Amino acid sequence: MARRKQESDAPKQRKGSADVMGLRAEVLEQPITETLETNYMPYAMSVIVSRAIPEIDGFKPSQRKLLYTMYKMGLLTGARTKSANIVGQTMRLNPHGDAAIYDTMVRLSKGYGAVLTPFVDSKGNFGKVYSRDMACAASRYTEAKLAGICNEIFRDIDKETVDFVDNYDGTMKEPALLPTAFPNVLVSANTGIAVGMASQICGFNLAEVCETAIELMRDPEHNIMSTLPAPDFPTGGEVIMDTAAMAEIYRTGRGSFRVRARWRYDAKANVIEVYELPYTTTAEAVMDKVAELMKAGKVKEISDMRDETDLSGLKLAIDLKRGTEPEKLMAKLFKLTPLMDSFACNFNILIEGNPRVMGVGEILGEWTAWRTECVRRRVYYDLARKREKLHLLKGLGKILLDIDKAIAIIRNTERESDVVPNLMAGFGIDKVQAEYVAEIKLRNINREYILKRTAETDELERDIASLEETLGSRRKLQGVIIRELQAIIKQYAEPRRTGIVYADEIAEPEEDETVEDYPVHVFVSREGYLKKITPQSLRMSSEQKYKEGDGPGTDFEATNRAEILVFTNKQQAYKARLADFADTKASVLGTYLPSQLAMDEGEAVVAVIAPGDYSGQLVFFFENGKAARVPLESYETKTNRKKLVNAYSDKSPLARVMELKDELEIAAFSTEGRALIFNSALLAPKASRTTQGVGVMTLKPKYKLSDARPLHETGIKNLARYRVRSLPAAGALLRDEDRGEKQMSLLEG
């Protein structure tokens, strides 16, 4: 019975058979969930923990195995050796093949230039990170050794600062982590794609990272961006600094920022020379994109482009046609090519075997805690060695009292095995001390030798007391770390390679001259469908088609190059150009704005405004009876941002948005059926977009402000009944003759 019950509780598997090449073969059917659990999950965890995601020392396992192999080969102080030799030796720790090992070495090398602080001092052709086609030479042709910075990685490795584990076949030991004396996890750029997760860490300047770590140890509330202003890349370029976005990346470990190339203009030759590229692109990718644009006729200012990269470094030469303005052309190329690219951050790091996405401050906190433990283990190791030495010297000091007695004991002992016990008994010392004394050479059994050795006792006792004090104080341990970081800054610091340009300082590129400008009429339905119709098409057919349940919302005249601002119910505004929308006819539904502008889920259009030159003002009417008057220039951005968050106050739902060019009379309506008329001059302009505004309409409970329009667009006849001279006011109940034909807003319906 017990056996039958066990069989019934086991996962159900069905047996079947299949005919393969004329032979009958049994097929065991297994539930997919069991297959995933027994086969796929171990593989996924192995990739995450043992291959793709970097750990707190800043290395992935393959990088760590390579560097440790080079260290054991004596390449920290010795001469270079052939890369093939290093690759072969590394296979004792990394069984994934010579090609993968060599690729790892190339990435860490000085010649390739993928990391700010190269760990491999290379000789020969290792390729270039900024070139897709410039491949490295085979490992048998190149040579390598460890770079000087590796002294700060392996300095304490022989003092039990980190744990050692068996290699894949159990024949030797390897370090689980390397005791890096600086926060390499932020200094070295690293990318890893695991199963179900990934890691993308940008590099930072070594000196800035070390200085930030020091300041955070001194003051946990330190402003990180004051000492670590932005990422730094080995390929140079310029970071387009959006302070708020960068602060969010520093806080959460996720986000993106833009990097652009550096260039110079040679007026004599009328040539633009690009000499630094974004870290995320290559020279070939830029060349291909520019060639594509030239073929399509979108960059008519360029006559030719060449790759003139040589031993002096990268150089892409762009020949300009006569009369071309370099600044305008580069602004266009930044917009259309990878000369300006985004770097997506995902600071996913393994902490004690668990992947965690952390901000910069949290990463440095974890590194400090880990490094503190490394230093603690090193101090404990040094303390144990000094205690052992002191113990031996104290035994030797007792021999000093009567050297002749020690010689007599040894001489009069018949058996060798009795020498140590007899010394122990004769001088009252333990076995370890007696063994030490017994091993002293005959030539050293003199008073001078023994006095020199025992003179170290006082110094050892002072050292031991200092080490014990350090071991018991976290502050002193961090003081050791700070001194080491300061020494690293002094010895290895290099200037920033990547410049910083603030987004507000960059003018938005002018409208592409290839975009034709002509008058258009814009219609937006209540549900957010936009139609851009030319006057000729509108004259041919003016009857608008709408989706069932939809209807007219707003319309206005503009030009094809004009901008529009689309306000949504999530307090966001999207900026778009009418040129980005195709010309349509009245008989089509139009373009659905939430899809076209990639709005968030559940986000709906509440108003569309044509800001023109941003010289006017906007009035936001809220359902709680308040109105906010905000200058349109608050929505003018010098950058190419397509989305503005916090576009208006979130304290009450939005009822209406009205564009105000000049002062005029406005009629506001409530759901109670009341109306009031007031002059817009009573609304004082506010500088902040998120202002709650001022009270306009006094509302009874359960009622709300439903609409507001310029007075001339309403059917109100008895103006004196509803006009007020001060705000807020309750207004008067609408009479039938004043209701008129009410124009519907985007919110209605």
Image (cartoon, grey):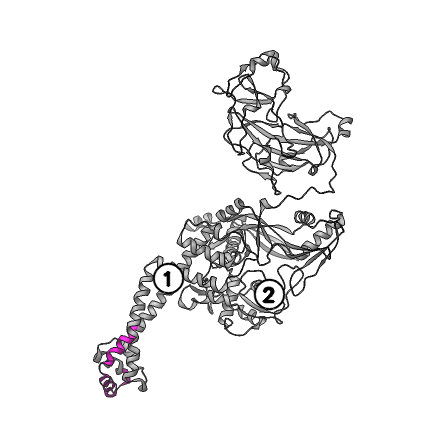
Q: Most prominent secondary structure in the magenta stretch?
A: helix
Residue 163 lies, in percent from the top left, at 42, 63
Q: CA distance from mark 2 to mark 1?
A: 36 Å
Q: Measured along the vertical axis of the image, is residue 280 above or below residue 623?
A: below
Q: How many marks?
A: 2
Q: Earlier in the sequence, mark 2 or mark 1?
A: 2
Q: Is residue 444 magenta?
A: no
Residue 308 lies, in percent from the top left, at 70, 61
Which stretch is magenta?
A: 390-417
Return the residue found at the far front: 268
Q: Measured along the vertical axis of the image, is residue 257 above or below residue 172?
A: above
Q: Secondary structure at mark 1?
A: helix
Residue under numbered circle 1: 376
Q: Please state which amino acid type lies under the numbered disc 1.
A: Arg
Q: Secondary structure at mark 2?
A: loop
Residue 42 lies, in percent from the top left, at 50, 55
Quadrant in the rendering for residue 713: top right
Residue 352 visible? The answer is no
Rendered-image quadrant of the C terminus: top right
Tag of residue 687: none
Q: Nearer the viewer, residue 16 or 304?
A: 304
Q: Is residue 208 left or right of residue 424?
A: right
Residue under numbered circle 2: 111
Residue 694 lies, in percent from the top left, at 51, 26
> What crowding class fits label 2: few (fewer than 14 Cα within 10 Å), some (14-19), or many (20 or more)?
many
Quadrant in the rendering for residue 733: top right
Identified at 61% across, 15% down, the residue is 716
Q: Please state which amino acid type lies under the numbered disc 2.
A: Gly
